[in-house]
Image: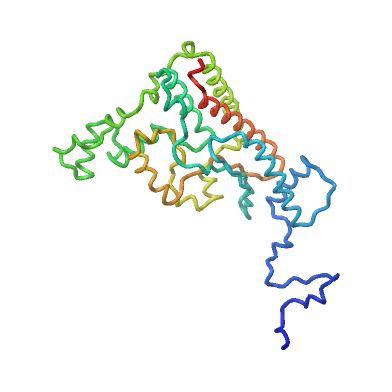
Amino acid sequence: MPRPDCGSRRSADLAGRAVALSGDIPTIFDAPLARHHRLVGSWVAASAPTATTFTRPLVRRHIERVFGAAVRDILQPVDLADLRVTVLGGGEVLPSALVVTCDSVGQLDLGWIEDSEAPLPWRAAAYVAIEEMLGRVLPVFGYQDLFDEIACYYWDGATDDDAARAALIACHGADEDDLEHKALPSTMNARRPGWMIATNVSPSADLPVALRQLLDRVRQSHDSLADMSPDCDAWHVDFEIVRDHLPGLEECSHLPPLTLVPVEQFACEVDDVGRHGMETGFMDVAGLYPLPDADRIDGWFASLRLSARFLCAVQDLLRFDPSNT
């Protein structure tokens, strides 16, 4: 029985000849390089020159492999959070872009700060330093961010007990006689462990030398980032630009995916503010870097290295062993 007609030539006629691709085969198999491949490809050609001749599919894989290896080499020592780099193609109006996102969700492991018997001022010094600086790189929220969110959820934005009581009655229909059982700003603040409170921080001169050196490394590497121009900052986030490049994020929670708030003490509050994010996703962009031309890629990599150095310094601080002092 003869075979049905096919849109492509019979295989016996294809050997050793030019192949006419069927219209059913996606044109991506032989499409010209996209703009973001050409941009990154220019950087690859300059940084890793090769005499090899590539077909279009192979050159795409070569560009992705060389660029990906360079990124992994920088981020490999960082295990504080799971970071991912994506190259966006852009469009007719938008330039291509390099995006760093954070795939980790939940509380960061605070190590000895949270679970050791080290003196309270030591633990407070480490925690407050991390809380002040870590948001420069990672999408993370601290206690004040949580408190502000809860104030809007529970107390119509009130931050003192009297105003919160009035809001509970007026906005939530609470019975005035039952207010003693309701959470208030003062009762929430009272649940903070002492190491979360800045007034408990020990003066630098009173800290052990090893801890003081770790804190100095964190501050110095953070200062290097602070001196960086936004034009070469891999970790800069402009929310209007992010929405343009990643319109789906508009449906996500505005809350970052990571927190420095100890969930053991604030499980209910973290669950309340994080519920929307768990359902729709969090604002997980750590940095979005528009890429109008290939000349800016070296600056982006320099920023990535500085940030990795900062994150490694934070990791070393969290791994400090107070029993060895």
Relative to 36, is 129 on the left or the right?
Answer: left
Can you tell which quarter of the image residue 44 is in? top right
Relative to 11, is 75 on the left or the right?
Answer: left
Query: Residue 95 at x, y = what percent?
Result: 63, 49
User: Camera-side residue: 127 or 173?
Assistant: 127
The residue depicted at 78 percent of the width and 44 percent of the height is 45
Can you tell which quarter of the image residue 85 is in? top right
Can you tell which quarter of the image residue 10 is in? bottom right
In what quadrant of the picture does the N terminus appear?
bottom right
The residue depicted at 72 percent of the width and 52 percent of the height is 61
The residue depicted at 52 percent of the width and 32 percent of the height is 136
Query: Residue 297 at x, y = what percent?
Result: 69, 40
The residue depicted at 62 percent of the width and 46 percent of the height is 97
Q: Identify the colour scheme used.
A: rainbow
The residue sitting at the front extreme is 323
The residue sitting at the left extreme is 177
Relative to 225, is 270 on the left or the right?
Answer: left
Count of labels in the image: 0
The residue sitting at the top extreme is 205
